[in-house]
Image (tube, rainbow, N blue to C red):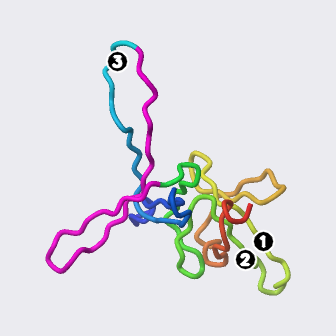
Amino acid sequence: MANRERFLAKAKHIKTGEWVTGYYCKMAETTYCTIGEVPPIPVHHYILHETMTDWGLPNRFLQYEVDPDTICQCTGLKDKNGKLIFENDIMQGHIDDLSPEDISQFKVVWNGSGWVEVQAGCTDREYISEFETEIYEVVGNVFGNP
């Protein structure tokens, strides 16, 4: 996979609940020496989004604190409409144009070595192929469509 989109992530903004897309960053509030007991250190999760400021001025990153339970990595693949596919997205499509009533759905997950499809009620997991992304489209995600 040659594109850099696979480094993108999306997550829900902690204050607004809106989805933000950009680069994931995790940061602890502070660091302690290991002498003695170390108190719990709050950790924050961010999505950084590059934005233009004005012509000729340096671009900058906007920083959005996000809910870590909603962080989804980009697969680097796009659906049939050209929309980026992320982890936990729900894909839907017709496998056979001759049977338009046969709609197939699956969830996108990482299995440790590649992106796979998980269909409800099925234990089989198949790797997602470029062919499938040409016939399927993103119709939601597990956070909005459990």
**Pointer 3 residue:** 34
Q: Say which residue appears at 72% left-offset and 77% top-offset.
A: 93
**Pointer 1 residue:** 104
Mark 2 residue element: strand
Question: Which is in the foreground here, disc 3 or disc 1?
Answer: 3
Q: Say which residue appears at 82% left-offset and 85% top-offset.
A: 100
Residue 3, x across and y down, in percent:
40, 66
The kind of residue tagged 1 is Ser
Mark 3 residue element: loop
User: 63 and 77: which one is in front?
Assistant: 63
Q: Which residues are magenta?
A: 37-65
Earlier along the polypeptide chain: callout 2 or callout 3?
3
The kind of residue tagged 3 is Thr
Residue 123, x across and y down, in percent:
79, 50
The kind of residue tagged 2 is Gly
Label drawn at residue 93: 2
Q: Say which residue appears at 46% left-offset and 65% top-offset.
A: 21
